[in-house]
């Protein structure tokens, strides 16, 4: 397999394992580079000043050198060392071992094996460490939202909701830790609903990360806006407020982090559009419903190798979801964002949702012509006339 492709897959595997809380360590071995006496590199996660970092142990013949880096910079350093002399790289996680073997300058092999380490203690440690928000009587918002009793004990019927809140923060944490506080001055949660995740994000940013970020929830239903503003006041969250409005009408100028969880159908496109136009450093959306593209596929009736699948409603729905979100990632990349796709469990009654993450990278070299070629080819293959997000930007041909 192509060397650069497998290395990127290995890098993505590390990022996903960190985001999902199942990372144990990375080991680089079989060194054949130019650095004198270097034998191995071991990488683990450490928490310093409430921030997760990648801790590198460079093992030489007579000494060890330790260096700590942020997650993104650490991932880039791992890739750099793989490209410069290490023949084997292994990711150990609680879910699997991910083994990358470099065969020569152009070829490599990537294998997935069952986890080889005793992960019982590692798993429990990770879960304890990754519970970034701890319920207590001091967190008034959890009580007023019906998550805990007055003493800060999580209700049995709210256990899944509390896990969901923590999972959301766990997924965002590695990405936030790569940004400086001055880079994230304004956050908007589009379609914030009852504000479970909005309050949690504010709590994490202010109480754990010690940022003074201003957070705004945008919600169409006035009763929920009034409820959430009351809870924010009672909790002493002075930089958190909720406003009534739609995603389409919201002026997102100056927003550094934009979130939209379960915005239905093209409302997710509206949110992504707002984030890109605002130049947000980070865009995080969990799409809900994919009606627009499904209608386009049904109407287009393209003849292709997937006809035998698309004649079934359930398969059509799943295909529409992948095509819709796939084009969304391409459009984010067109505008200079690096994209990640993760899974986010909504609640006990809902299957895992796709979480689309766009990270702005001003140094990213974008081949816009090639991206548009991919978008247009995808539309033609599935008989799609237009994608709502490309129409918002006037990109559709």
Image (spheres, rainbow, N blue to C red):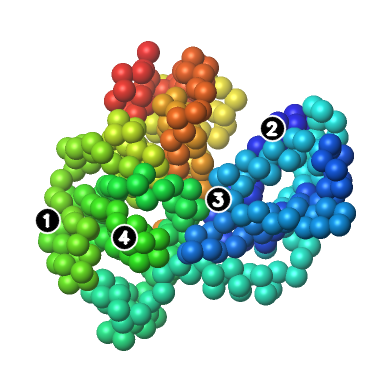
Residue 115 against residue 289 in the figure, above or below: below
Between marks 3 and 2 in the image, the one whose residue lies nearer the viewer: 3
Between the C-alphas of marks 1 and 3, the distance is 40 Å
3D distance between C-alphas at marks 4 and 3: 22 Å
Quarter of the figure with the C terminus: top left
Residue 144 seen anywhere in this rendered image of the structure: yes
User: Residue 244: percent from the left, percent from the top?
Assistant: 14, 50
Precedes in sequence: disc 4 or disc 3: 3
Q: Tell me which residue sits at (75%, 35%) in the image.
A: 83
Q: Nearer the viewer, mark 1 or mark 3?
A: 3
Give the residue number, with chain letter if any, for mark 3.
70
Point out the tag, 4 or 1, that comes first from the N-terminus. 4
What's the CA distance linking mark 4 and mark 1?
Answer: 21 Å
Q: Which residue is mark 2?
A: 5
Sequence order check, earlier mark of 1 and 3: 3
Spot occupied by residue 228 in the image (x, y as percentages of width and height): 19, 63
Q: Residue at x 85, y 50 (%)?
A: 39
């Amino acid at each position: 397999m192509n060397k650069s492709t497998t290395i990127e897959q290995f890098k993505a595997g590390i990022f996903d394992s960190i985001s999902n809380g199942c990372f144990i360590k990375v080991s680089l071995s079989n060194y054949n580079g130019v650095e004198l006496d270097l034998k191995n590199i071991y990488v683990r996660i450490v928490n310093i000043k409430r921030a997760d970092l990648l801790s590198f142990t460079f093992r030489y013949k007579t000494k060890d050198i330790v260096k700590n880096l942020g997650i993104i910079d650490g991932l880039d350093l791992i890739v750099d060392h793989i490209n410069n002399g290490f023949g084997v790289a292994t990711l150990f996680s609680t879910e699997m071992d991910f083994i990358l073997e470099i065969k020569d300058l152009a070829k490599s092999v990537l294998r997935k094996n069952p986890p080889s380490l005793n992960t019982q203690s590692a798993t429990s440690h990770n879960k304890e460490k990754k519970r970034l928000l701890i319920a207590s009587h001091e967190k008034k918002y959890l009580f007023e939202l019906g998550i805990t009793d007055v003493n800060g004990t999580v209700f049995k019927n709210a256990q899944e909701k509390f896990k969901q809140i923590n999972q959301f923060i766990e997924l965002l944490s590695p990405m936030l830790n790569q940004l400086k506080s001055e880079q994230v001055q304004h956050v908007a949660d589009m379609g914030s609903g009852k504000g479970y995740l909005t309050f949690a994000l504010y709590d994490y940013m202010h109480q754990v990360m010690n940022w003074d970020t201003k957070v705004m929830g945008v919600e169409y239903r006035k009763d929920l806006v009034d409820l959430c503003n009351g809870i924010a006041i009672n909790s002493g969250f002075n930089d958190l407020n909720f406003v009534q409005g739609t995603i389409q009408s919201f002026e997102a100028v100056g927003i550094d982090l934009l979130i939209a969880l379960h915005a239905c159908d093209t409302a997710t496109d509206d949110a992504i559009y707002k984030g890109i136009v605002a130049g947000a450093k980070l865009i995080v959306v969990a799409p809900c419903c994919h009606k627009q593209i499904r209608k386009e596929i049904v109407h287009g009736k393209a003849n292709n190798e997937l006809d035998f699948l698309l004649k079934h409603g359930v398969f059509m729905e799943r295909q529409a979801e992948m095509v819709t979100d796939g084009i969304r990632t391409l459009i984010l990349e067109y505008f200079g964002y690096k994209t990640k796709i993760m899974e986010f469990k909504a609640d006990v009654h809902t299957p895992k949702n796709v979480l689309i993450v766009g990270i702005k990278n001003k140094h990213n070299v974008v081949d816009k012509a090639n991206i548009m070629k991919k978008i247009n080819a995808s539309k033609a293959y599935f008989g799609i006339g237009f994608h709502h997000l490309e129409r918002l930007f006037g990109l559709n041909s």
